[in-house]
Image (tube, rainbow, N blue to C red):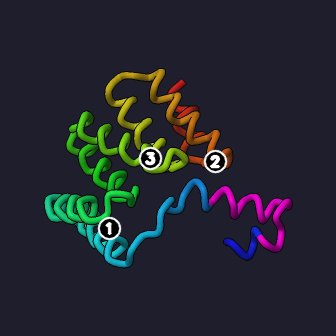
Amino acid sequence: MNMAIRLDPDGPVGKAAEQYIVTYLPKFPVPDEAQDLNNRAYRLDHENKREAAKALYEQCIRLHPFFERPYNNLALIYWHENDFNHAEKLLRKAIDITPTYVNAWITLGYIKWKQNDIKEARRCYGRALTLDPGNEEAKEQLRLHR
C-alpha cells in the first residue's frame, strides 16, 4: 500500500491505497497477540461458538483497548443476540478510536435500523459511503432502506 502511494501519490492507485489505509486498517499499531486473539475469536464465532468468541473478543479489548476490530466483531455477536444497546456502545467506542472505520459505521447502521431509527441508520450508511464511495455494502443498505 505504501509503495503504491509513493509510486502514484496523485494518481488513482495511490489515492485508492491511501483511502484503504485510512478506512479499513487499524489506526494504531496492533501487536501480534491482539491480531491473534481477534482472529481466534472470529473463527470461533463462525463455528457458532459465540460464548467462547465473546470471551476472546473481550480479552482482546481489555488487553488492547485501541484496536478497533474486536469492538466491531463483538458488536456483531450482540446484534445477532438482539442486544442492540450493548452492540451500539461497542461500535461507538470503535468509532471513537477511529472515526474513519467504515465497517463500524456500516454495523452501526444495522443496529440503528434494528432499533427503528431509520434516519440514523441512513446517516451511518451515508457516512460509510462518504469515507469509501465504492463500498458496495453501504450502497446496498442505502438502496434497501429508502
- The tag on residue 132 is 2
Indicate the amino acid at tag 1.
Asn
Indicate the amino acid at tag 2.
Asp
Q: Which residues are magenta?
A: 6-20
Choose the circle earlier in sequence order: 3 or 2: 3
Side of 59 relative to 142 (left or right): left
Q: Residue furthest left?
A: 51
Residue with the mark numbered 3: 104
Mark 1 and mark 3: Cα distance apart in space: 15 Å
SS of the residue at dot 1?
Answer: helix
Q: Exactly how many numbered labels are in the figure?
A: 3
Mark 2 and mark 1: Cα distance apart in space: 24 Å
SS of the residue at dot 2?
Answer: loop
Image x and y of residue 62, in percent: 23, 60
SS of the residue at dot 3?
Answer: helix
Residue with the mark numbered 1: 38
The crowd level at tag 3 (other Cα within 10 Å; few <14, some 14-19, many 20+) is many
Indicate the amino acid at tag 3.
Ala
In the rendered structure, does residue 16 fall within the stretch colored magenta? yes
Q: Is residue 121 above or below residue 16?
A: above
